[in-house]
Amino acid sequence: MSTEVISQIDVDRTRGDFSYPEQHTFDAGTGLSHATVDYIAEVKQEPDWIREFRHKALDVFLSKPMPTHWASKDLENIVFDNIRYYLANSQRPTRSWDEVPDDVKRTFERLGIPEQERKFLAGVEAQFDSEAVYSNMKKALGDEGVIFVGSTEGLKEHPEIFRKWFGKVIPTGDNKFSALNSAVFSGGSFIYVPPGVKVKHPLQAYFRINAENFGQFERTLIIADEGSEVMYMEGCTAPKFETATLHSAVVELVAMKGAKIQYVTVQNWSANVFNLVTKRAIAHEEAEVKWIDCNIGSRLTMKYPGVVLKGRKARGEVLSIALANNGQHQDTGAKMIHAADETTSNVISKSISIGHGRSTYRGQVYIPRHLKGCKNNTECDALLINSTSRTDTYPAITVRGSRNSVQHEASVSQVSAEQIFYMQQRGLSEAQAMSLSVNGFVNDLVREFPMEYSVELKRLIDLEMEDSVG
Amino acid sequence: MSLVIHNLHARVSGGQEILRGLNLEIQKGSVHAIMGPNGSGKSTLSKVISGHPDYEVTSGEVLLDGVNVLAMEPDARARAGLFLAFQYPVEIPGVSNANFIRAALQARLKDGEELDAVDYYGDLYKEMDKLEIPRTFTSRSVNEGFSGGEKKRNEVLQMAMLKPAYAILDETDSGLDIDALKIVAAGVNALRSPSVGMLVITHYQRLLDYITPDVVHVLVGGRIVRSAGPELAYELESKGYDWIKDALTEDVHSEELAAV
């Protein structure tokens, strides 16, 4: 890989760990109550149906217990009363970087976002704490009828499409954190691609947390109409604060007949962030949804991107890579719900646990008895680096009836001292040797990724290995 | 310019001493062979010189052109010019041979310098051709699923590409049939030059039919007990190691008494 390609992708943890002093015009204060919800709805001048939706969601959130009977007890360390739920400076993103306030603009320039936009993106949305500060798309796409705006704008300006799909893929009560998001959501992307339109270059969103004791709750809704294609990529960073930060997004995708959606995430939150995200897609007849999910950062990530295969011959795929370093728990996986004949799903998960890091794979595959010709393939591979790291695999696969097929493979391997010594004997440092092993482990999966992201991922892995060797 | 091993004592960490005062000097441009029976410390020697973490040096020095390498990490020793052809080369899944060798070369460059990809592949293909390695090799994972012969050829290829000042070949003949042995030996011979010193470790004289050493040493009980010209290898072959062990018994015995 040439240096030129690498220099295009300037998003990494060392670059993410900085912050500018805060000044917020809109601040919902600390703690969560119905008053918080009213504040948000008022500031955003939302219609009544959304305000009601939020209040109901808050009740659901308050009534649901923490899922600690199956999930990490670390969830109990989230102090909801200490979190700020809405911080923003403005209610409208600008269309030009020149109009973005200096501090915020400097943040995104340091993260390399405007540069990436010029080089290879069809559109960019940049969210700073609760709201998008910048949102722009190449004019040609707008002329074709493509909509790419923030969720606030989507709700206001395209209510007929927004309301039809909002909350339909992931109901409020799906889990405690989808309910929380539904109560206080702000920011995120709204995308609509008209029938037959193929968006050639990726649309990108960048989520930045700048404030301490803050919760970011973006809400993304992507609708790819019949026969259309779109690729969406999201990146995220936050400065490393002493206290915990919460990120709890809801992402809903709808792929209509024959549409293709590819959703790429490179999650690189700082190690104090609780990252509890619900992501699901509905794939109609012959539609294809592919989640590419890379989790490098955060303190605890719980995320299981799913596809409901609703139409005949729909196809769902989750390719995921998780890297858990000291003090991190990556609890990730996939859900594939087959609901029509001849639907296929593919899940490939690779996790790397380093030091005291822990990675968990949780999968759910469901194929009911009345369907025929459905196929699922699940592969989970775990790599352990040194003996203190931990990996767990919980694949729940339910296949009924005799006309469907399923295949499951799992492996656990370790980077051995002999491998490291062999590579060191050839002149590679211990960190370089570990990096090479880890990259080798994820290599066949990374080949499936868009070029720009595979380069970024390799660099993030190199950085993690340098840190872990010290 | 030489690799000097001076009064080297070493053991597996916490275990019994295996090398017990080993002395050896390998000049650049020369090929030395070490022969010895099983358990004499042959493989330990190669691992201690290259810095394997399981071994502990209790006293002595290893000087690479005057620099004591024992305090250096294994990778720093390698970059200083030391190469070990492994008896059992290690598999690295998912890492292609081409990328691996390239990373090793890149690690020898200064910060900010980048290996030229065209030159690199030119050199790599040239060396692969000499060792009769097919082009498909570059995209295969390092040593994964390789036959014994392929693994050993890969070691020699890496040596050719990394151009060490001193190379240790640890039982490079083990696991090879005669055809593979000839190819590997030809590869090693092609690398003989005034700028490299080699130490060939072997149990059998067979390898030395193809790689003729300048000096042959016999290692018994963790020390060099005999050093002579290539004819010593033939003597060992015909008489066996017991001959030399018997000749030494008295010697070692008296030393052990002295140590008590």
Image: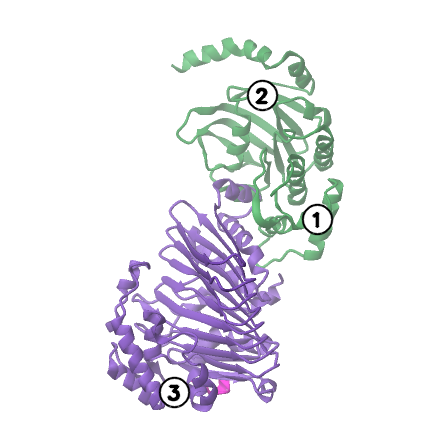
Chain colours: A purple, B green
The picture places residue B83, in percent across and down from the top left corner, at: 60, 38
Given the image, on which type of amino acid does mark 3 rest? Ser
Question: The disc numbered 3 marks a residue on which chain?
Answer: A
Q: Residues within 10 Å of mark 2 (few under 14, many from 20)?
A: many
Q: Residue at x 66, y 51 (%)?
A: B139
Instruction: Specify whether disc 3 shares its chain with disc 1.
Output: no
Residue on which the image places disc 3: A90
- Which structural element holds mark 2? loop
Mark-to-mark CA distance, 1 and 2: 38 Å
- Which structural element holds mark 1? helix
Q: Residues within 10 Å of mark 3 (few under 14, many from 20)?
A: some
Mark-to-mark CA distance, 3 and 1: 58 Å
Residue B200, image quadrant: top right
Residue on which the image places disc 2: B36
Residue A207 seen in this snapshot:
yes
Residue on which the image places disc 1: B136
Tell whether label 2 touches label 1 (CB within 8 Å). Answer: no
Q: Residue at x 60, y 78 (%)?
A: A227
Q: With B128 as the anchor, is A160 left or right in this view?
A: left
Is residue B197 part of the magenta span, yes or no?
A: no
The picture places residue A239, in percent across and down from the top left corner, at: 38, 69
Q: Residue at x 55, y 36 (%)?
A: B66
Q: From the image, state whether disc 1 or disc 2 is nearer to you.
A: 1
**Which of the labelled discs sits on residue A182, or is there none?**
none
- Which structural element holds mark 3? loop
